[in-house]
Image: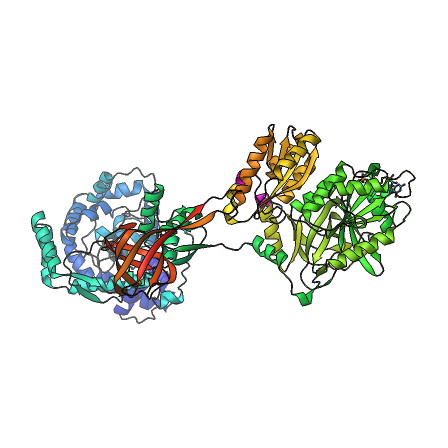
Amino acid sequence: MKIRIFALAKELGMDSKVLIDECNQAGVKLKNSALASITPEERDIVIEYLNKNKQPSDSPSADVEDQATLTPQREQTKLRTIKAMTSRSQPSRSVSQKSVSKEKNTEERSSQQEDKPSVETHETEEEPETAVVEGASSELDQPEDAQARPDSIQRMAGGRSSKEDNGEGDDQALSRDDYVPAGGAAPSSTIREMKPRGSTRSGKQQSKAKSKSALPTVAAPPAYKQPVIPKAKKKEEKAQKPEVRLTADILEQKSPLAAHLAQHTEQKKRDKDRDPQDEDSKQRRGSISLVEARKQRREQRKEGRRVFAPDGTEQQETVGRRPRRTKRKQDSSNIVHKTEAEVELPITVRSLSEAMGRPAKAIMSIMFKEFGEMVTINQIIEEETALAVALELGVDLTFKRQKGIEETVNEIIEQEDASEDLITRPPIITVLGHVDHGKTTLVDSLRNSKVVEGEAGGITQHIAAYQVEHNNHKLTFVDTPGHAAFSEMRSRGANVTDMVVLVVAADDGVMPQTAESISHVKASGVPMVVAMNKIDLPEINEQKVLTDLAAQDVLPSEWGGETEVVRVSALNGTGLDNLLETLLLTAELHELKANPNRPAVGVCLEGFRDEGRGSVAWLIVQKGTLRIGDAVVCGKSYGYIRAMYDDRDQQLEEAPPSLPVKVTGLDSVPGAGDHFAVLSDIEQARELAEERRHEGRTDTLARHSGGPRTLDDIMGSVREGEIEDLSLIIKADTPGSLEAIRSEISKFEHPEVRVKILHEGVGGVNESDVYLATASDAIIIAFHVVAEDRAKNLAVQEGVEIRRYSIIYEVVDDIRQSLEGLLRPELVQEQTGRALVLQTFSISRFGKIAGCRVLNGTINRNDRVHVIRDQKILNQYPIASLKREKDDTKEVREGMECGILLAGFNDIKEGDLLEAFRINEVKRTLDSTS
Ligand SMILES: Nc1nc2c(ncn2[C@@H]2O[C@H](COP(=O)(O)OP(=O)(O)OP(=O)(O)O)[C@@H](O)[C@H]2O)c(=O)[nH]1
């Protein structure tokens, strides 16, 4: 029966592999497998071999030597733990750790074993369980204890004989711990003591137990390396990869940073390659004194500094000192001294300097000397100041203003059309007159509609417009709530009216409002036709009406005047055709034309909010054609024209010139008198409307352009020659006062100026007077009367001056002064000095300079000069530059020499005579006619 090697190994307490080796050495050839089997005979041979070779000797050291020869040195040869062990606790780490040398240890141990063998046996029996655990642990953790082997071999060798001798049975089995590998005990330093947790055994006890061990001395085991168990890594979050995107510039090192880095690296390289002297000095720097360091620096400076050209190449700077920040010298060769310049608003010292080609310093110096103002180069200066400075420097300065949308729109509105584009358009007629004289009834009769019945209280509440047709000609009528509204519209520049129908009730004659209306019409300068209404009434007085009209300086044509008076009955429709005919004739006479083929412009007559349609505006087209979908700005409103209706609420697609239409689509309700214009871009319209809203303006054109409102203004504005008429509205307490004032004023006669009385009346100053004054740039004279509150407020609002007087001579004096102020001052030339040109110098940048001697008087910088050659005056020129030696001067006196540069004249010659003069303005009086 075959015996398996593993069974035999188990029986012998050996490792199967060890047993196989032993078998092979004993001459029993086996496969290197624990499953190999041998015969019982072979087993006996092996056991005999083992017994023979493992015969216990008296000398432990001899045992060790034998053992070393018996088995080759092997690592990690394991022996299985077999039941109870006799000396399993003997291997002591503490002892082995302390071991100095293998032999020494084994000697000690063997001597101890010899001394106290019984104690050891006794102790191991006391702790059988612990020993098993220890053995099991050691099997798992590490190779067999080095000291276990001698014991097991001893027992194995003693095999059966020891059993027989001691009388102990097979239960005294060997343990794995008893095995010592062939190489001997493992180095103590690498063996870890294994003990259960909470073990109460102290190291002392262990060493004590060890000292009692009777183990034989064995050869030192081969070096054993404790296997390093890699520590379980803490679970960390995966590191984020930074997102780095390299641009093409970076890759190509084109970026400024890359360039800088490249330069820096290059410089570093150079520094490295620098001559060793530098390095020495660097090393020495720490130790040298400050004085020495300064000396070195100076020397280095003398030698020259290393500088880098923009391309990165090194250059040797020849200048010893670090260049100081010097003031940038202007390249004077580029400066052109102009005599005429244009500067954009707002003006700064810099922009003025650049525009005139003069140094900013010169401007600042003039500002300081002339105005006592210290200004900086970027400071904004006023137009007047700039003009004064320019005058001082001999420059004719003009201002360039930037165009805003407002100006662009105004240009569109005011744009004149070519005569060939113009076609005849219907006249726009405004109906004026005293209350209840029948204006609305007349318009109503003309358009055959009963508008009158719908009015609240029978009084016209708002402006509305209608178009009527007569003999294939269209006429547009605008019904106004009165002449004040008419003037108000006019004062806002919304003068849409081509002619006026003045309604005078034949039974009533000219009433105060009729007179006011006449004044307004006269002031507006539009033609007027009188409709003598209510001729159907029995108690009418036509002659009285004509007389009243004549008294108002409205002379009827039947009395040889220019005003047509047409008799009508608005109620019955009598004379209406005649009236329409007269109006058409008048329109024809005035050739009313417009270009329909252009973006529409016109005026808003009225605006209101309709519940269904939103904001609705009554617009009247003056030029062009308004179409649905047009982008419109109207005052502060804007929008696309969504729908269009005529006066009968009929939808329209387009509105030609003079057609009044109701439109929808504007974002808000525009005001009466607001101009509208069609723009190509709704954004432009929106921008302009919002700009107006922001600035609180309605429409620049809607406001009057700002003529003089006060007598002082008139006097101030005289020099510009804008006004030649002094418009007055005179209100007095009595007709006598009016008469007296009129008589005094009429005495002022002058071919250049005159007094124009727009309106005169008895009573306080009312709103109508203010509107008239606003529309006509007139002054209101209130003699012994006051202004109504509303009129006073309106006057303040509109900037109209109401002058109150109680003495008639004061009125006359003020009017005289104002008239004299209107007279343009007389310009008188005053000769200041004469200079002879001795020599001329041509300087390319400036021109020809005349070197002169002043013969008499003085030559001033601001003078103009007559150039006289061969006793003939060539022309007159302003002085561009006046110098004494090399310095600019304001004045050169008789006998002195100077350099004169004339603006606009470069042909000065030696021998020319320069006659300097200044122009003085002499105020004129009404008595002077020159
Ligand atoms: N007999 C007669 N009465 C007329 C005539 N025209 C108007 N009336 C009447 O005069 C009154 C006033 O007429 P309106 O047309 O309202 O007068 P208005 O000038 O428009 O008045 P306001 O709107 O307040 O400015 C009405 O009662 C009309 O009927 C006319 O030709 N003959």
Q: Is residue 680 left or right of residue 237?
A: right
Residue 646 visible in this rendered orientation of the protein? yes
Residue 434 position in % (x across, y down): 79, 39
Q: From which residue to which does the magenta span run?
A: 693-713
Residue shown at 63% from the left, 56% from the top: 413
Residue 450 position in % (x across, y down): 88, 46
Residue 382 visible in this rendered orientation of the protein? no
Residue 312 position in % (x across, y down): 25, 66
Residue shown at 15% from the left, 57% from the top: 62
Between residue 831 and residue 93, name the one nearer to us: 831
Between residue 591 and residue 490, name the one nearer to us: 591
Q: Is residue 671 left or right of residue 180?
A: right
- Considering the whole magenta stretch, tell me its main secondary structure: loop
For residue 47, which quarter of the picture? bottom left
Question: Magenta includes 706?
Answer: yes
Question: Magenta includes 378?
Answer: no
Quadrant of the displayed image that contains ligand 1: top right
Q: Is residue 350 left or right of residue 307?
A: right
Between residue 105 and residue 42, name the one nearer to us: 105
